[in-house]
Image (spheres, rainbow, N blue to C red):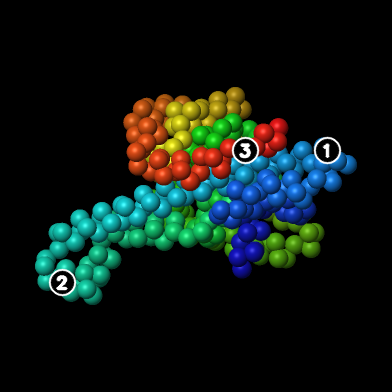
Amino acid sequence: MESKLMDSSLAGVGCTGEYKDQVLIAREGEWRNLMSKFRGNHQLRKKYDEDVYNEIHHRMLMLHNAAGVGEQIVKVAQSYVKRKLIDVVRDATGRLPPEVVEDRNRLHQALLGLEDVELWSKAAKHVEGPWTFILIPSPVPNAFVSEILPHRIFITTSFFNQFIESQDELALVLGHEISHLILGHSSERNRLETSFRTMEILLLSLDPTEGLLSLAFMAFLASIRNAIGAVHSRENEREADELGIKLTAMACFDTRAASQVVNKMHKQNVESGGEISSGGFLSFFDSHPPSDERFRTLLEESVEENKEKYDETSCRNMKTIFWDAMKPSKEEGR
């Protein structure tokens, strides 16, 4: 079932057939050795087919950055959620009668019935555990996290090519996506998404054309998803922006520079008349409509939420763990 859900997720951004073989995957911690392994495995290809080598090398650098930056964001998200859960449990416990606090079973039941405790307990479940980072070859710019395929961050090559010029920008995008998961926004759309994925899986399994017919149906179903309503409401976007920029700062990235990614998306959206072509598939613009207002708000929030604020706390730890490892070698930077 999981492999079918994966196929459906890939097909949703136009990745089917032979393109699925070009999907690149890195599990948590693996990004540190990605480029050295790549060079070791492709030396002959570099000698005899440099163009192909350079193309694959470019995509491996994308995966290296997605996994490295993604791991930093995940780690601060796990720390943030753990702290929030402790805080809400401590606060709730302090407001309960002594007889409830002293009875373990009654305390457990009382805490489970509280909205804040339930929210942060679910958030902890969603973020804890090893994560996987998936780079999808696709002309559709998108990045997403899904409850139905937990502990995975997906990002397409075209999102990198069109909008990502720095690790700061990438961090904000991934922080925003994980924030939707933490804040429970994914649960709100999960039933609808699961229903559509079930239909897509059925189409994929019945398609005798090895994906050609399914591709057309995927585009059709994606358009229906869009028409049924915005996947993320305006309020959800505001909340995810607010938490996303905080996670970006906690992970030691430049939040002011990171905000430019929203500005670039907004400008491209305006230039295209608000209709960036994605071939009918679900793009980042469908679920996260960029606006100048969002960009300006992020710039304002970056004054408060920046890496200097966390220089003596989470940022110091992140620098120790990641800073040297994240620097690509001279060969990788070519």
Label 1 or label 3, whichever comes before in sequence order: 1
Asked whether the residues under the numbered discs 1 and 3 touch, taking CB atoms below 8 Å apart as contact, a structural biologist would say no
Apparent side of residue 244 relative to residue 260 in the rendered image (left or right) = left
Disc marking residue 102: 2
Disc 1 target residue = 50
Label 1 or label 2, whichever comes before in sequence order: 1
Neighbor class of circle 1 (other Cα within 10 Å; few <14, some 14-19, many 20+) is few
Disc marking residue 200: none
* Rendered location of residue 247, percent (x, y): 41, 42
Residue 200 can be seen in this image: no
> Which numbered disc, 1 or 2, marks the residue closer to the eye?
1
* Rendered location of residue 81, percent (x, y): 36, 52
Which SS class for mark 2?
Answer: helix
* Rendered location of residue 243, percent (x, y): 38, 42
* Rendered location of residue 52, percent (x, y): 81, 41
Q: Measuring 28% from the left and 56% from the top, which residue is drawn there?
A: 86
Q: Measuring 54% from the left and 36% from the top, which residue is drawn there?
A: 167
Which SS class for mark 1?
Answer: helix
Disc 3 target residue = 328
Which SS class for mark 3?
Answer: loop
Q: Distance from label 1 to label 2 (Cα)?
A: 69 Å
Q: Distance from label 3 to label 2 (Cα)?
A: 54 Å
Q: Quadrant of the N terminus?
A: bottom right
Q: Is residue 282 above or below residue 122?
A: above
> Which numbered disc, 3 or 2, marks the residue closer to the eye?
3
Q: Amino acid at mark 2?
A: Glu
Q: Distance from label 1 to label 3 (Cα)?
A: 20 Å
Q: Is residue 96 above or below residue 326?
A: below
Q: Measuring 46% from the left and 40% from the top, which residue is drawn there?
A: 319
> Which numbered disc, 1 or 3, marks the residue closer to the eye?
3
Label 3 or label 2, whichever comes before in sequence order: 2
